[in-house]
Amino acid sequence: MGQLAEGGGSRLERTVDTVRSYAPASGELLAELAVASDEEVRRVVARARKAQRAWAVLPVGERMARLARLRDALAEHAEDLVEVISRECGKPRHEALVHEVTTLLDHLGWICKHAPAALAPERLDLHLLKHRASEVRHEPRGVVGVISPWNFPLVIPMGSVVEALAAGNACVVKPSEVTPLVMLEAKKIYDSTGLPEDLFAVVVGHGPTGQALIDAGIDFCVFTGAVETGRRVAAACGQRLVPCTMELGGKAPLLACEDCDLERAANAIVWGGFANSGQVCISVERVYAHEAVYQPLLDRVATLAAGLRQGDPARDFVDVGAIIFPKQIDIVRRHVDDALRKGARVVCGGKAGPGQFFQPTVLADCDATMTVMREEIFGPIVPFMKVRSDDEALVLANDSPLGLNAYVFTRSSSRARHLAERLEAGSVVVNDVLSNYAAVEAPFGGIKQSGFGRVHGVEGLRDMCHRKHVSFERVRGPARDPYWFPYTARSFHWLQRGVRLVFGAGSLARRIGELF
């Protein structure tokens, strides 16, 4: 659901030994932090491994009781978290509170309630080896490394942290060099709970620090960021055979059918396109509107977008904040310029403001040749394209290497289900936007180049585990099974007869199966 920063920018200074964090809305220097050396990263992982051994032997219920203390502490310090998120990300306080803090608290509460059942051994009913009993156990992997993005610097990494700890792992986070202070604040709150300090650690640095974390011997990696950076992270994991989850961004289409609720669709597009200044991997990044509703929907979206208040959230309540990573302003500007050259029209916004701001922008008359319809924007632009049918919208929506989220707006439930079945995405949301990430019971992740693996839900918890199959005997067996050594003509004859009896066309098992 985010991006991993690479490269420099006007408000981000990279040096070998330090990371400097700036407030994107004002340019204020917030902190200068030392970069963790490769040796320090190795020591942190080693301490985490030692702490994990003691943590893993605790019953799941006991781990959940202790993690409940973390949930309570995070709730108690919600205002502190909102303040540091808003300042370091330049995002409105509402979004810091709702998108990050509240979603994290709900996620942690769900885990505390449901992890014991989700991680309990699963009994298997073996269909052939009836003399054996089997179960699948979910056992911790060890030390989980999390390489996290700058757009949601609390909820994304901490979601993986609490999933890892619930499953019995330790966790080491390398936050984005653009927004390190948020994760350090979360670590401070964690340490105040009395939980083992080395069980959860934070290492600050640039891209090489993420490489050092993988090289330090972690047992699982969770990466959220851009596709190209994800390729490098996945390659580094593959070199060491470290399993990983990759969430690599999206290009979410919104299909506005001719029977959609225009007012709800318009409000959804504005919020889904401009929340967090469009710096959301599941943002509404392209709208395919049926020709019957194209113009009234476009007009209403432009009116709503023009009324959004943009500015420094530290000074006032605003709707749209700053661009967190300076490089994104240039990317957004290039998308707009390309669209205009190819015939699109700006109906709202279209310009960069002073500092790290870009106006909420609505583009009309877009087509599939424009980069704004094909490449991830990660900024406050919503491009509109007119379509004549659902089938045309589906072809255009699926014509993308990315497949994280997709949205459908229609009054017909059967139509929504039909479109959802045919859309190529990890999640499809009907008559709503962005909400699926907050549905912590549901797995979240993408297909195609949007990545692999899932976070959230039972699937996210179990991905933090090894699956171990344990097979028991129901009754004491003979000294030797009939298919063991020695192989003889007599034993082969009886095995052949057994195969025909069990699997043959006229077998009792086949006839019973045909009846049911």
Image (cartoon, rainbow, N blue to C red):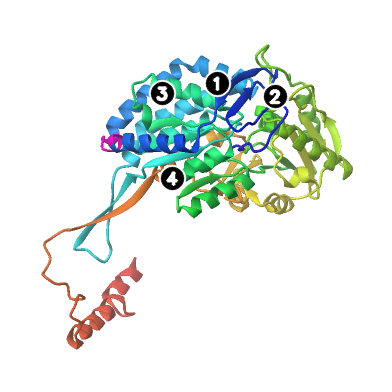
Asked whether residue 58 is drawn in magenta, I would say: yes
**Secondary structure at numbered mark 3:** helix
Dot 3 corresponds to which residue? 190
Calculate the distance from the C-alpha at mark 4 to the C-alpha at mark 3: 22 Å
Most foreground residue, 75 or 125: 75
The label on residue 220 is 4
Dot 2 corresponds to which residue? 322
Q: Residue at x 35, y 41 (%)?
A: 118
Dot 1 corresponds to which residue? 97
Q: Residue at x 50, y 24 (%)?
A: 184
Most foreground residue, 263 or 244: 244
Calculate the distance from the C-alpha at mark 3 to the C-alpha at mark 2: 28 Å
> Split into 4 quadrants, where in the image is the C terminus?
bottom left
Answer whether residue 293 is visible to the viewer in this image.
Answer: no
Mark toward the start of the polypeptide (4 vs 1): 1
Q: Are marks 4 and 3 in contact (CB under 8 Å)?
A: no
Instruction: Look at label 2 and name its amino acid.
Output: Ala
> Split into 4 quadrants, where in the image is the N terminus?
top right
**Secondary structure at numbered mark 2:** loop
- In the rendered image, which quarter is residue 330 located in? top right
Calculate the distance from the C-alpha at mark 1 to the C-alpha at mark 3: 18 Å
In this picture, which residue range is highlighted in magenta? 54-60
Instruction: Look at label 4 and name its amino acid.
Output: Phe
**Secondary structure at numbered mark 1:** helix
